Image (cartoon, rainbow, N blue to C red):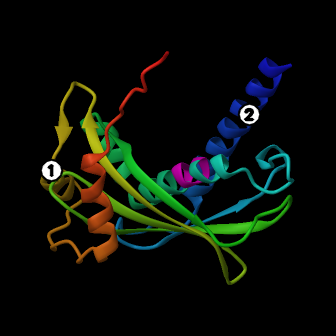
Amino acid sequence: MAAIWSLGYRMSLLLRLILLLLSSARRSRLHVLDTCVTPFRVWINDLDVLLHMNNGRYFTILDLARVDLMMRSGLWRQLRAEGWYPVVTLETLRFHRSLELGDRYDVHTRVIGWDEKHVFIEQGFVRGDVQVALAVVRARFLKRKGGTVTTAELLALAAITQASPVLPEWVASWSEAEGGMAFQPSSST
């Protein structure tokens, strides 16, 4: 039974990705620093046992919305040509309201700044005109042949010459504080 559920879960994500790729090609072009609005709907397999969208699903939807921004800005094609790909290194999500079966919502995705190694992205879940949840994601880019893409290389690829906007103080502190996070295995008796 678990294998069937797992296959259904993966298939729904694959279906969502295919639908996103098809719709991104038909939607308006964006600059990578524009706000990208990606529409979604809560599907039955998005629900948890309390019948609202599972908290883990929010993170998956955030991934898809970032793909939409990269596709619509043309960055995705450029990254693939270079053999580069994004990875999330840190993310946080605050919930304000629930999403329930059939709810339509949009994810608003925008780059809020960068440092030498990372790009910071704000993503908000909006139902109607009400913010449901807000996430901040820190990402960097890696090379398929090994190594890290510097922010300077990424900005050059995207033809961005401006300096980073000033990051909100809490975002800079949050990113910096993560450096002290380390796994400490507990001793077993």
Q: Which amino acid lies under the numbered mark 1 shown in the image of this protein?
A: Glu
Extreme residue toward the front, this view: 189
Mark 1 nearby-residue class (10 Å; few <14, some 14–19, many ≥20): few
Residue 49 point in image, percent of width and height: 85, 46
Disc sitting over residue 75 in the figure: none
Q: Is residue 63 magenta?
A: yes
Tell me the quarter of the picture where residue 62 sits: bottom right
Q: Which amino acid lies under the numbered mark 2 shown in the image of this protein?
A: Tyr
Q: Is residue 11 magenta?
A: no
Secondary structure, mark 2, is helix
Q: Please determine whether, in this image, residue 97 is positioned above or below residue 61.
A: below
Task: Check contact, mark 2 vs mark 1: CB within 8 A.
Answer: no
Tag 2 residue: 9
- The residue under the point 42% across, 21% down is 187
For the image, the number of numbered tags is 2
Give the foreground label among 2 and 1: 2
- The residue under the point 81% across, 51% down is 43
Secondary structure, mark 1, is helix
Tag 1 residue: 153
Residue 85 point in image, percent of width and height: 34, 39
Which residues are the magenta region?
60-64
Q: Please determine whether, in this image, residue 44 is positioned above or below residue 127.
A: above
Tell me the quarter of the picture where residue 164 sits: bottom left
**Comes first in the chain, label 2 or label 1:** 2
CA gap, disc 2 and disc 1? 36 Å
Judge by depth and name the residue closer to the eye, 77 or 124: 124
102 horizontally vs 63: left or right: right
